[in-house]
Image (cartoon, helix red, strand yellow):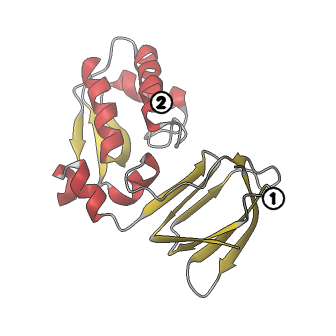
Amino acid sequence: MTFWLTKIEWHWEVPDVTLYFASNPQGGNRKILCRSVELLHIEDLQHPPDIGFMPEPVRDHPVLWPFADSICNLFVASAPQDPYTLIGHLAAVHDHFENWFPFSTWFARKNVEEQIDLLRSGSGCFATGPRRAMEKYRDILESYGCRPTLVSNDPRTDENNEVIRDRCPFSCMVFDPQIYVVAMDFEETAT
């Protein structure tokens, strides 16, 4: 069964949104009330993608990291031999985040050449972002001899992923990489 996003209804008195979906004649239409919305991501309202099925809310997804994880600063204390190869390696590991965030989202310098200059200097804040992303970056920086240090004043930094997931009040519904919602609660009904 295929669904299409047909309408978005904002409830201005509270941060709620209702998404309306149409389907082929035998499938029936659906609406999803998203309560306490923190993020509604829709890339192209003019050409919304077909959605093959209605997803279930999930509690552990890279989209939730900025809302659930402690925010950490990642510093380098030594220059790598080849900063371009290191950046390429980071781009490859960034695929672990399933392209939910642009590659340079957490870099200290948004321009990649400036980020390479920072690496060449061998000292400074390389990136700031959710702990799980920064840990991946740290491991790569370490493998290139950059002597990385992860710093956070947040006591949650040492929590394991299960504790983080359980503590986070949000879930997300990922309809497609072009359409996803982060909210406290979701309620799906037929229309």
Q: Left or right of 157: which side holds 95?
A: right
Between 148 and 32, the one lying in front of the other is 32
**Is residue 152 in view?**
no
Q: Quadrant of residue 16?
A: bottom right
Give the SS element for disc 2: helix
Disc 1 target residue = 25
Q: Nearer the viewer, residue 36 or 148?
A: 36
Label ID, residue 95: 2
Marker count (numbered): 2
Q: Specify the farthest residue to the bottom.
A: 13
Mark 2 Cα-neighbour bin, 10 Å: few <14, some 14–19, many ≥20: few
Query: In the drawing, what numbered circle is on residue 65?
Result: none
Instruction: Judge depth for marks 2 and 1 and give the one in front.
Output: 1
Closer to us: 130 or 18: 18
Name above or below for residue 1 compared with residue 88.
below
Q: Earlier in the sequence, mark 2 or mark 1?
A: 1
Q: Is residue 137 left or right of residue 22?
A: left
Q: Residue furthest front?
A: 26
- Quarter location, residue 73: top left
x, y percentage for residue 62?
43, 46
For the point 64% across and 83% down, the residue is: 12
Q: Amino acid at mark 2?
A: Asp
Image point (62%, 50%), residue name: 53
Give the left or right position of residue 183, taking residue 54 as reference. left
* In the rendered image, the vertical position of residue 102 relative to residue 166, given as above or below: above
Residue 4 percent location from the top left of the image: 75, 55
For the residues labelled 2 and 1, the Cα–Cα distance comes to 37 Å
Q: Secondary structure at mark 1?
A: loop
Q: Amino acid at mark 1?
A: Pro
